[in-house]
Image (spheres, rainbow, N blue to C red):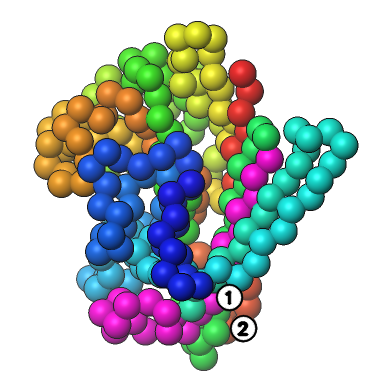
Amino acid sequence: MSVQNLENKVILTLGSGSSAEAILDGTKAIRGGIPLVFPQFGTAKNPNDATAKLPQHGIARSSIWEFLSATSSDNKDHNDDEVTATFGLTGSQTPKNLREAWPKKFQLIYTVSLTARTLKTSLKVKNEDNEAFNFHVLFHTYFLAPDISKVSILGLSNLTYTDKVLNGARALESREKVTIDQEVDRIYENVTSDEIVVDLGEEKGNLNVKISNTNLRDTVVWNPWIDKSRGMSDFDDEEYKVMVCVETGTVADYILLSPGQNWEGGQILSVAI
């Protein structure tokens, strides 16, 4: 976990580390770990959408969160020991330019729980506005892989996806194992499988990460490959060879949340060696 602490407030990223070129001074979202996407995935397609003035991936990943609490459990079987931390973000905590771009009143509660073999992340969204609002949510998980040519993703077969590399073309995934040998930026829709497995292809025995989700409908697979890597200032030109993003969320369609109502969803990453 990479954490920036400012008194009792943090900008945080979780997962397998950040890009070698990630900017860690708080001026830009951290590239790596598990950035939180809310309330807009990418940029809005319709200029009339309420989120149309927001930057790429919204406000949560680039705002300063408040640390709320931490707990730990000590079990006889130490593999079951669990540490949990909770963080909060409200509209009033976001930078002024983002509040002006999306002036909704909301509260986010982000809970992170860690055991020897699992990482659980969940997000609760409360609408504190006097009107309903739409939002996307995504756990933008980065995985570090020794060799992208040996990575495969299972659990996406027979799902319809939107291919952002091909200008939003839609197709059906026919492969049992999704592999990466070019730029990939796909939204797999209506993921009904209980789990997705990311085989990271470790040379000394396979390392598989199982992704289970709650109340999330879509899965994004992303690798920028050669040309796009060279165009990102916070991403090393060669890092596409050692990473893949497999991201659970709801981004193909918006979630509608009425005033005073709550929404909650999350994921569990489980490691099997």
Q: Which residue is mark 1?
A: 126
On-image quarter of the C terminus: top right
Image position of 59 (left or right of 189):
left
Give the numbered dot on residue 260. Answer: 2
Residue 126 in the image: state x and y as whole percent.
58, 75
**Closer to the camera, 147 or 78?**
78
Image position of 169 (left or right of 37):
left
When asked about the image quadrant of residue 164, the answer is top left
Which residue does the image show at 25% across and 52% down from the upper left? 23
Residue 40 in the image: state x and y as whole percent.
37, 63
Residue 109 in the image: state x and y as whole percent.
58, 68
The amino acid sitting under disc 2 is Gly
Give the numbered dot on residue 52. Answer: none
Check disc 1 and report its element: helix, strand or loop: strand
Magenta highlight on residue 136: no
Q: Which residues are magenta?
A: 91-115
- The mark nearer the N terminus, 2 or 1, is 1
Asked if disc 2 and disc 1 are in contact, CB closer than 8 Å, the reply is yes
Query: Badge 2: how crowded within 10 Å, few (<14), some, or many (20+)?
Result: few
**Closer to the camera, 206 or 190?**
206
Residue 115 appears anywhere in the view: yes
Check disc 2 and report its element: helix, strand or loop: loop
